[in-house]
Image (tube, rainbow, N blue to C red):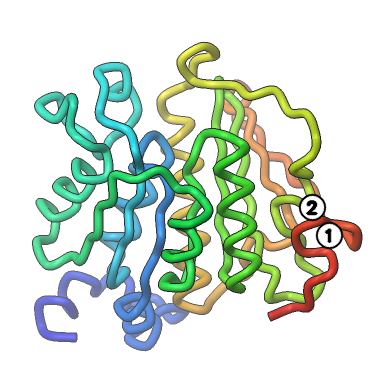
C-alpha cells in the first residue's frame, strides 16, 4: 500500500483484528454483489470505502424515482440510468482509484457460473427467491462464501452460508427450492427506508470479516430483525443431509 492508502485506511489498520495484513487481504480481494438497490447500495458503499480491491456489481434494473427513498447509492439526476453503473459512479466519486465492474445483466445461472469463481465473497442483495437459489447453487458449486440479506416492510434477515465448513448449511437447507414461498415485493408491501441500510451494513460487515479473516461469521445462524421493536432474534441452523443442493456434496 502507498502512503495515501495507509492514510485512507488508517482507522482499520489501528484495529488489532485487521492491521496492515488484514487491510492488505481486503485490497487483494474481489467481492461480487448481486443487486444494486436497497441492500446493494450500503453493501457496495461500505465494501468499496473499506478497501476491497475489486467490486463486481450486477443489476439488470434502472434507477426509478421510487428507489430514492432508500437506495442511497443513486441520485435524482440518474433516474433511468442502470443501477449498477449509478452505484459505480457514486463509489468512484468517493475514491477514483476503486476498481468497479458494473454489469447491467440479470443474474442467471450462466452469468453466475462465470462470475462466482472470480470472487472471494458473494453478497446476495437480490429481491426474489429464484435469484437467491441461483446464487446459492453457484456458491455451493464453486465453494464460495455467501452473505445473504433480505428486507421487507419492517422485517430483515441476514445469514452467512459457507459450505466449505462441513456442518454449515446452504440457503437451500433453510429455504428448499421446491417449497412454495409467497413472493413479496417492496412495490406492493412497502419497506422502511433505514431497514435496508441496517441489513446491508451487517452484510458488508460479515463480508469484510470473511475476507480479512477475523471474528466469527454468521455461519449456521439466521439473524432476524424486527425494526418496529428494534429486536434481534437468532436461530441456529445446520446443514440438511437431504438438501438437494449441498446435502451430498463434501465440504470444500
Picture coordinates of residue 94 (x, y %)?
A: 13, 54
Picture coordinates of residue 4 (x, y %)?
A: 10, 77
53 in relation to 20, above or below: above
Name the residue rendered at 9%, 26% in the picture.
Answer: 77
**Which mark is drawn over residue 153?**
none
Please tell me how crowded label 2 is: few (under 14), some (14-19), or many (20+) other residues with Cα within 10 Å. many
252 or 42: nearer the viewer? 252
Q: Quarter of the image for the N terminus: give it.
A: bottom left
Name the residue rendered at 72%, 58% in the picture.
Answer: 170
> Given this view, does label 2 or label 1 mark the residue nearer the observer?
2
Picture coordinates of residue 220 (x, y %)?
A: 75, 60
Name the residue rendered at 48%, 55% in the picture.
Answer: 123
**Which mark is drawn over residue 238?**
1
The reply to whether the C-beta atoms of the residues labelled 2 and 1 are less than 8 Å apart is: yes
Q: How many marks?
A: 2
**Which mark is drawn over residue 173?**
2
Q: Quadrant of residue 63?
A: top left
99 in relation to 4, above or below: above
Amino acid at each position: 500500500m502507498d502512503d495515501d492508502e495507509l492514510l485512507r485506511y488508517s482507522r482499520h489498520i489501528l484495529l488489532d483484528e485487521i492491521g496492515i495484513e488484514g487491510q492488505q487481504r481486503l485490497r487483494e480481494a474481489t467481492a461480487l454483489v448481486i443487486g444494486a438497490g436497497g441492500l446493494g447500495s450500503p453493501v457496495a458503499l461500505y465494501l468499496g470505502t473499506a478497501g476491497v480491491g475489486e467490486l463486481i456489481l450486477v443489476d439488470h434494473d434502472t434507477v426509478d424515482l421510487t428507489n430514492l427513498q432508500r437506495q442511497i447509492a443513486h441520485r435524482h439526476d440518474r433516474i433511468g440510468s442502470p443501477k449498477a453503473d449509478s452505484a459505480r459512479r457514486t463509489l468512484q466519486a468517493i475514491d477514483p482509484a476503486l476498481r468497479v465492474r458494473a454489469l447491467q445483466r440479470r443474474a442467471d445461472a450462466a452469468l453466475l457460473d462465470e462470475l462466482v469463481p472470480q470472487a472471494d465473497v458473494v453478497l446476495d442483495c437480490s429481491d426474489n427467491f429464484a435469484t437467491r437459489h441461483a446464487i446459492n447453487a453457484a456458491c455451493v458449486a464453486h465453494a464460495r462464501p455467501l452473505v445473504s440479506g433480505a428486507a421487507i416492510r419492517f422485517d430483515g434477515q441476514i445469514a452467512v452460508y459457507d459450505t466449505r465448513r462441513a456442518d454449515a448449511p446452504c440457503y437451500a437447507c433453510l429455504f428448499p427450492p421446491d417449497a412454495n414461498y409467497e413472493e413479496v415485493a417492496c412495490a406492493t408491501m412497502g419497506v422502511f427506508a433505514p431497514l435496508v441500510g441496517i441489513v446491508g451494513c451487517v452484510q458488508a460487515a460479515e463480508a469484510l470479516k470473511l475476507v480479512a479473516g477475523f471474528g466469527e461469521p454468521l455461519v449456521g445462524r439466521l439473524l432476524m430483525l424486527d425494526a418496529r421493536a428494534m429486536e434481534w432474534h437468532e436461530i441456529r441452523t445446520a446443514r440438511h443431509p437431504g438438501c438437494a443442493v449441498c446435502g451430498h456434496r463434501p465440504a470444500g
